[in-house]
Every structure is written in C-alpha cells, then in structure tokens.
Image (cartoon, grey):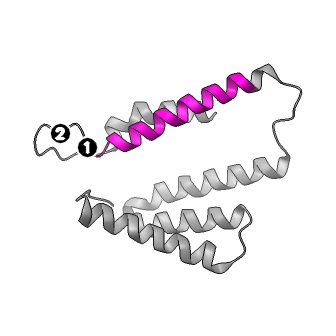
Amino acid sequence: MLAVFAGLGLCMLDSQVQVFSFGDSSFDARFFPRIVLVLILVLALLSGIARAKKMDEPIGSLVGWGRVFLVVGVISLALWFMPSVGFLLSAFVVASVTAFILGERDIKLYVGLPLLIAAIVTFGAQYGLTIPLP
C-alpha cells in the first residue's frame, strides 16, 4: 500500500507542487519531495519482496493497524485544511497527534518538540529558502 501511495505521489507531484522558476535550476520545490517519494517507493517494494518470501508471519495486530489508519486520517485532514489554516498549524497538529497516537506521553515531546520543528521548517522554508508555503 505504501508503494502505491508513493507512486501516486510521484505521479501527482508536478500538478500539486507549485514552482516559481527564476532561471534554469535543477533544484526546485519538487526536488526533495521527489527524492523522498522515490526512496519510499524503492524501500516499500524491497520490503514487500522480502516479506513475500516469509509469509508465515502475521502482518501486524489490529491495534497497530488502527494506529496506522488514525495517523493516515490525521495527515489527510491536515492536508485538506492546510490551505485555510496554513502549513505551520497543519504540520504541528500532524506531528503532535502522531506522537500521541504512537504512545508518547511527555508533553514536552508531543507538544513542544513538534511546535519547535514545525516553526523551524516553516520559517526556514519561507525566509531561508524562499519557498512559498500555504
């Protein structure tokens, strides 16, 4: 499933990521997402091939799959609302809720750290790299 969604992300990347070209540059706003999606796709395919050789193991508990679907739902909602609430709030909510769902109970690590990282990424992209974010 991960390989399918990474492949879909690669196919939709050109239409979803807006690029402002100021000349002939090989590095644009699609460069790093493209690298990450290709890596996810390759690793998911290799993992699927390795798992196919030993199918005797279960693929996970129901609780684990529930957590996966909760995280995917939170990410989907954040992407849906990102144009109206902005990147900073969306990234913070996704990171914070994901940390909480995966079992982190220290408030500094599931509220403070996501807020700090979301702020660094947001302001670094906007002012350091001049990448327009929603």
Q: Quadrant of the N terminus?
A: top right
Q: Quadrant of the C terminus?
A: bottom left
Res. 14 image quadrant:
top left
Q: Report the span colored magenta.
A: 28-50
* Dominant SS in magenta: helix
Res. 16 image quadrant:
top left
Q: Which residue is mark 2?
A: 25
Amino acid at dot 1: Asp
Question: In the image, which disc is placed on residue 14?
Answer: none
Point 58% across, 76% down: residue? 111
In this view, 35 is above or below 54: below
> Where in the figure is residue 129, as x and y percent of width and height?
25, 58
Point 50% across, 30% down: residue? 7
Question: In the image, which disc is placed on residue 28?
Answer: 1
Which residue in the rendered view is the most extreme toward the left? 23
Res. 23 image quadrant:
top left
Nearest the viewer among 88 and 86 is 88
Q: Are discs 1 and 2 less than 8 Å apart at CB? A: yes
Amino acid at dot 2: Ser
Secondary structure at numbered mark 1: loop
> Where in the figure is residue 115, as x and y percent of width and height?
49, 74
Judged left or right of residue 112, residue 134 is: left
Point 61% across, 32% down: residue? 44
> Where in the figure is residue 122, as x and y percent of width and height?
36, 65
Judged left or right of residue 83, residue 72 is: right
